[in-house]
Amino acid sequence: MDKISQRIKKVVVVGGGTAGWMSAALMQRILGTQIEIELVESEDIGTVGVGEATIPPIRHVNAVLGVNEAEFIRETKATIKLGIRFENWKNLGDSYYHTFGESGQNHAFCQFHHYWLRAEKLGFNTNYWDYDLNYLASVRGVFSNQRAKDPSWDLPYAYHFDSALYGQFLRKISETRGVKRTEGLIEHVVIDSDTGFVSQLKLQDGTDVNGDFFIDCSGMKGLLIQKKLGVGFDDWSHWLPCDKAIFVPSKRHEKTHPYTRSIAHQAGWQWCIPLQHRNGNGLVFSSNHYSDDQATQLLLDNLETPALGDPKIIPFRTGRARKQWHRNVCSVGLSSGFLEPLESTSIYLIQSAIVRLIKLFPHEGVTDELVDEYNAQSKNEFELIRDFIILHYHVNERTDSQFWRDRRSMEVPEHLQNKLQLFKANGQLVQDQIDIFKDPSWLQVMLGQGITPKDHHPLANAPSDQQLVEMLTKIIAHKRAPLDRLPEHDTFLSTLCEGQ
Ligand code: FAD
């Protein structure tokens, strides 16, 4: 593609799910004075309607959009998420947390876990997570968003929310600020024969929607990026063989906990997401191991509260569009690829894609350089998240099913293999810059899934045995100190929403 397309004056967003409305809202906020934005969606097709757990960067979206937190929490029936509790992942009956916090205090060259590892060898055995306030607050069910006087008492957090209400929330913001919404079913996508670029959408009711640039947020089918432009798909199901999800809402808990539960079963896993008005539940499973009926029964048998409707099934394919941006079409959301929601990354990937597109926005026309850079960064980002998800499956000690034995014995991507070897040898972690999961996340999952490094960093040998024990005892006490002053999670929510 040597040819430079024309200047981009109008962007058309195809689809009105989370991807479509988040793209429209962010583009409008940042580029709205320079470009016109029109979003086309079909109520007859509808949206996926799941996607209820997030990670902390969602708060940047709110900040950029200028959203009031109390209004957001009230309108989307949100609760706070401090992390995920993984149950039965390492072995039946075991559990650990992957929180958004960090254990202990880091020395400039030596991460806290090296001291903890050395103490373990001395026989000073403590739970690694006892040094992490996010964990302590999760277990006690308390939370505050106030900035603490000591930064090590801050609680990094995200939200659980009702995805349908979140879509409406973003739609309201976008439309108020000038995004044009067009209702209608897209029947044909027209390509300009000179440039090969998409130029127009033809709707069932006879309306034509023209644009200079198209953001494909049409969901898993990828109406433009796959169906029209046929960019191909990198299939990762040999590493992540779950290919269906079944989900159902259930009655809310009397007391909501500020974390997601992820419970591994014999060939898949179940999520439990507490919202203000109901629980979100689902089972991600491998159709080679469970029939739809078996999966439905498994989910219904394991609900914490009575179901509030009939379960729905969604098949999916794990992997990514080979070119997430091609010609004048950039795919965002499910059309760009899918990774199971084990670490709640899909909405983050929408945010990241649109921020990347805004940074590389082709104001003066699409060029190879912009497209190649975008695609290289997206590929890297998707692959790192993929590896993080594979880690949960691969490092396990379960012997109760072939599914888990196969995950353990499978060959994993080389980059992940190297990361694992390094950590096993001496507890070192290497941070990939573009990876949204930083060292504390990798560390918690590696330790939680059962890896104990053979050695620790020599700097952790500097304190005497007694100094080390005193240091760790002090850190635990320091991390616990604010707990009694934090309000219950539900009290925090009601106070925030009522005080608005
Ligand atoms: P969709 O919601 O499918 O929207 C597609 C849009 O395109 C719709 O508006 C539709 O009307 C429109 N459309 C399609 N074809 C046409 C046409 N021909 N004409 C007009 N309009 C059309 N993410 C998280 O971050 N956290 C989670 O906990 C999480 N859980 C998930 C659980 C499951 C089981 C699944 C499948 C996904 C989960 N996700 C999660 C992902 C999250 O749901 C999606 O990333 C998010 O909803 C974005 O979807 P989307 O907007 O790309 O697609």
Image (cartoon, grey):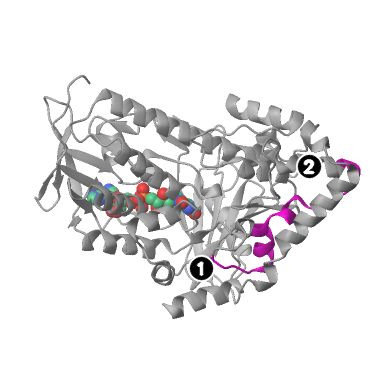
Q: Residue at x 50, y 47 (%)?
A: 244
Q: Position of residue 298 (x, y in %)?
A: 61, 57
Q: Nearer the viewer, residue 155 or 452?
A: 155
Q: Residue at x 43, y 71 (%)?
A: 70
Query: Which type of secondary structure does the marked residue at label 1 adopt?
Result: loop
Q: Is residue 145 magenta?
A: yes
Residue on which the image places disc 2: 115
Separation of marks 2 and 1 at Cα, in angstroms: 38 Å
Q: Position of residue 25 (x, y in %)?
A: 29, 54
Q: Is residue 165 above or below residue 410?
A: below
Residue extent of the magenta highlight: 121-146
Q: Nearer the viewer, mark 2 or mark 1?
A: 2
Residue on which the image places disc 1: 275
Q: Residue furthest bottom?
A: 498
Give the amino acid type for the residue marked by disc 2 in the picture. Tyr
Q: Is residue 218 above or below residue 143?
A: above
Query: In this orientation, does residue 47 appear?
Result: no
- In the rendered structure, the answer to whether residue 475 lies left or right of residue 99 reads right
Q: Nearer the viewer, residue 113 or 369?
A: 113
Tell me if mark 1 has few (under 14), some (14-19) or many (20+) residues whose alpha carbon lies within 10 angstroms of its own.
Answer: many
